[in-house]
Image: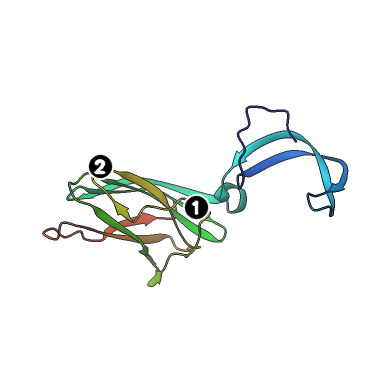
Amino acid sequence: MSDDSDLDIKDDDIIHVVGTVKDKYDGENALGGSVSAPRIIADSIEKSDYATAFAPAQKTINVNKTQNQHGFALTLQKVELAEKETRLYVKIENKSQDEISFYDFNAKITADNKQIEPKSDLSEYPEIQSEILPGVKTEGIIVFPKIDSKTANIILEGSSENYDITINPFTFEINLDK
């Protein structure tokens, strides 16, 4: 419980609480079952996100490089290396007159003569929209298993509804040893 009325907490939010266990709360739930939980006096309460709370970055490489093909502008914002995963922060802007598509499931990282596929079904991270109308921006995170390498090539794919143009894979060479 908090007296901070400025705290905007909703269902499924991740909250970071620093405090002291005061005692134990005993009571009943809505179905009449017994409930027992520690009562914490909070020194601070703040909203967090999944990556910060459960998989904090051990290293962040700020890339901020944009490649533009026929109005399909893809920016690799940063790469985060965590204990058990690698996260790509990607932003896409459709500056063309046609719908474009992005295929996060086709994303690949090559490192040390290995090809690494993204992890699947990670709804705790924001997803990049796959169908992007003209003038629309979208961004999200693509998660891979942990990468232990000094360099990596990141390969991201998309296409345009305009079949007269070709969108080649967007490739970024990243130094992970920075």
* Front-most of residues 128 and 19: 128
User: In percent of the image, x 13 and y 58: which residue is there?
Assistant: 165
Visible in this render: residue 77? no
| Residue drawn where x is 14% and y is 61% of the image | 163
In depth, the one of 40 and 115 nearer the eye is 40
Q: What residue is pinned by disc 1? A: 125
> In this orientation, does residue 153 appear?
yes
* Residue found at x 25% / y 61%: 169
Q: Is residue 85 left or right of residue 150?
A: right
Identify the residue at image location x=60%, y=34%.
8
Amino acid type, callout 2: Gly
Q: Earlier in the sequence, mark 1 or mark 2?
A: 1
Q: For mark 1, does the 10 Å Cα neighbourhood hold few (<14), some (14 to 19), or many (20 or more) residues?
A: some
Element carrying mark 1: loop
Q: Position of residue 103 (x, y in %)?
A: 33, 61
Q: Position of residue 100 (x, y in %)?
A: 25, 54
- Residue placed farthest to the left in the image? 164
Question: For residue 62, which quarter of the picture?
Answer: top left
